[in-house]
Image (spheres, helix red, strand yellow):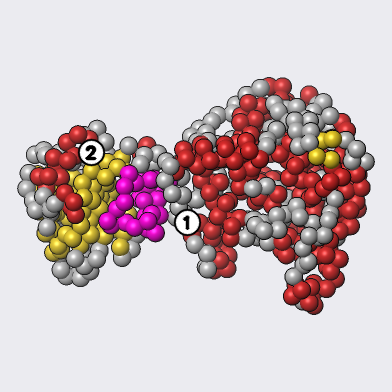
Amino acid sequence: MGQFLSSQCCEKKVEPPKSLLQEGHLLNLNQDYQYFFSQDWFGVDKPQFEPQKFIFIYPGYKEDQSQMEKFWSKADTINLRHGELVRQKGKVLNKKWQYLFRKGVPCSLAKKIILDTFRLTYVDCEAEYLSALKVVFKNKQIPKTFKNVPLFGCNTNEDDDEEFNYLNESEKKIQLILKVQILNQQGMEALIRLLWIVNNLNHFLEYNPMLLHIIVLLLIFLSEAQTYCVLQFMIKDSQQSLNDNQTKQQLRWHLIMNEEHFKETATTFYETVSRRSKTFSNIYQLMQNIHFDSFEFFQEMSISLMLTYLPFSAVLKIFIIYLNEGIKIYFRMFYSILRYVSDDIKSCKSSSNFKSILRKKIMNLNIEEQNNIIKQAFKLSLSESEQVKSFMRTTVSYTKNQPCYLPIPSQASDLISNEQAYIFEILWDWMSNMYKLSDPFLIFASKTDGHSLKQLYFKCQDFTDYPVLIVIQTNQNIIFGAFCDKMFAVKNKYIGSSETFLFTLQPEERKYNPTSGNKDYMMCAPDYLAFGSGKNGPAFQIDSELNRGFTYQSDTYDNPLFTDQKTQNRFKCLCIEVYYLK
């Protein structure tokens, strides 16, 4: 870094929007807005979050930030050099820096502190992220939208679905999970890209719903590239720490890799802390008496980084401590919060109002009360306890994540435009995991190779070991097709397996799996190509000139007719494309 801490003091850069300050219900936040917009830490030109929302959910911003800056100003004669703040393999900062972290890092310093903690520079991050983008997107143009998005075990609340109908499907899923909607459109796009890239480069990361909120909070302070590099550091560091008994017991890791490990951690947390705190033991007993789901409660608070329970200002302070000290801070905060509300919840008679009582007590804490709860959290000693070993008695297994992969076609399609690239996502989502990390390579296109089944078979003969995808557009503007794990090759018998399926892309996107009716998946005859069979006929069949075809409701796939008139089973092929997957 090579910059004095005092150089980060707030200099007036931008005036807050006048319209914002004229709204009646925001007048009392005038000082906070003025102070916030006098700073430049959030990137005036291209912030990835909504500054107005940020300060709206951070009441007392000026008072809180000023207080933290006073603590850090004591170090203003120290030249904070890159590499001085380093967290690696369970190690944390020296006591001086750790003390300042626990007092709270001001927003004006957060970016530099986070990057230096993970030993990252701007140049390093940009280069590493560019390399990751090339690997994941195969040096192709990055899609503007994604049909699917990896959520690492997060569950959406479909009851609130209508609230976000204006968003695309990926953004809607994410907003249904997020506990604070603070990112702007640029930030949302960055979040989705990061989820995609992290998923593609870390398939062993089976389960970590915390990841979504971690990215959101990082994007407040860091660029997309910097956020990626911090995430990769945390993932690799956690993987190493969880394989090392000493650092595993110190709870210095950041990310849990699978759900079983998470459940084990929650259970042993309650049991361990109950043995160390009589107050906590009474609360845990109360949960059991009223049949309150203690695991779900622990999970909810952890996944959301406590965004649904603590004021936003406290969430940010705890989050930066977490980046330095690891997961242990959330265990300590969980203990401290329950201890703080113990008198209020001890008379609770039912599980239905347990959370509401707790939220009412702590969501409106002032700055001083927040700091006291954080201070109380560090009175719980975990690292020195022999009982902490029980946290990690379970074996950590790195089972493969459900791949959420963006297939990149080898060349442009005449059937699927660049704007419709998400269609390949849909098709890949329908495939089994063994094929999801493949890309489609065009073998045959009727517009360039001609309407000839013989030519289609000829073009496929060099790819006999690969699965095949065929997409057909008819004169009725219906687009449908089939996937088969066996390549097209002339045989006098049906081929394929239960992996074979049919689909429609237009007018609707739908998959048709094989039924138990029969195993006549695909027939590659010299003069026709057919999928399925039954008392009515095949699901569809096209002739030797790839010109005409017919369709029936087959016993194999129980599909509808692939025509716009359900009484008409004939169609003409306008365009046919065949891909192999590799």
**203 or 276: nearer the eye?**
203
Asked where in the image residue 188 lies, by quadrant, the reply is bottom right
Asked where in the image residue 18 lies, by quadrant, the reply is bottom right
Q: Is residue 253 left or right of residue 142?
A: right
Residues in magenta, as a range: 406-431
**296 or 5: nearer the eye?**
5
Numbered circle sitting on residue 486: 2
Residue type at mark 1? Thr
Q: Position of residue 200 (x, y in %)?
A: 49, 39
Q: Position of residue 128 (x, y in %)?
A: 57, 36
Element at label 1: loop
Does 123 lie within the magenta span? no
Q: Is residue 148 left or right of residue 569?
A: right
Q: Is residue 73 visible?
A: yes
Element at label 2: loop
Numbered circle sitting on residue 145: 1
